[in-house]
Amino acid sequence: MNTKKVPRTEEEWREGLTPEQYHVMREKGTEVPFTGKYTHEKSDGMYRCAACGNPLFSSDTKFDSGTGWPSFDKALPGAVKQIPDGAHGMERTEVVCARCGSHLGHIFDDGPTATGKRYCMNSVCLELEAKKNNEAQM
């Protein structure tokens, strides 16, 4: 995991991200539930930060939470930071990329697995690096 910080201005972020990515990742927006491309994704691989490529979650930790956003029960060690979030009159914990500081979603203590965690992420913040199939070529 590359922990080197990403020194970009907001204008550079705006130029490098789609308008939806910029809104969610840099302005702390939220994508509409059940619209993200990874909500029902079941492929094996590594979910990375769409802004900087930092590895965040293994597909092995993904589960269907029924909330409309991709959910994971644990992040890779050191991949994300958790920040108290009192916005909108709610007590939540924001999850940001440890490398670039981009908003990814929130974490809740209502996950159904042994960790008890639900990392509720926005699809637009993620890029799935699919696991390569190493079957022999015929």
Image (cartoon, grey):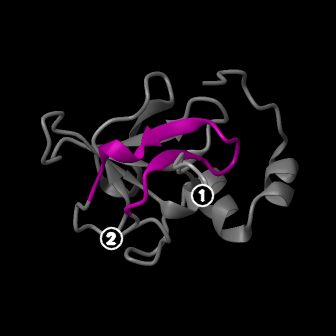
Task: Out of 49 and 7, give the one closest to the viewer.
Answer: 49
Residue under label 1: 138
| Residue 66, quarter of picture | bottom left
Which amino acid, by three-letter code, is at mark 2? Answer: Gly
Where 78 sits versus 40, above or below? above
Q: Position of residue 80 (x, y in %)?
A: 49, 32
Which mark identifies residue 127? none
Image depth: mark 1 or mark 2 in front: 1
Q: Is residue 92 visible?
A: no
Q: Would you call the spot at circle 2 few (<14 residues within 10 Å), some (14-19), or many (20 or more)?
A: many
Q: Is residue 76 visible?
A: yes
Quarter of the image that includes the N terminus = top right
What's the magenta region?
42-63
Secondary structure state at the residue bearing disc 2: loop
Task: Out of 42 and 82, give the one closest to the viewer.
Answer: 42
Along the horizontal axis of the image, is 17 left or right of 117?
right
CA separation in Å, label 1 and label 2: 40 Å
Quarter of the image that includes the C terminus = bottom right
Q: How many marks?
A: 2
Q: Position of residue 22 (x, y in %)?
A: 69, 60
Residue drawn at 38 percent across, 74 percent down = 33
Residue drawn at 47 percent across, 30 percent down = 81
Which amino acid, by three-letter code, is at mark 1? Answer: Met
Which mark identifies residue 68? 2
| Residue 17, quarter of picture | bottom right
Q: Earlier in the sequence, mark 1 or mark 2?
A: 2
Along the horizontal axis of the image, is 87 left or right of 127?
left
Q: Position of residue 46 (x, y in %)?
A: 51, 44
Q: Position of residue 137 (x, y in %)?
A: 61, 54
Secondary structure state at the residue bearing disc 1: loop
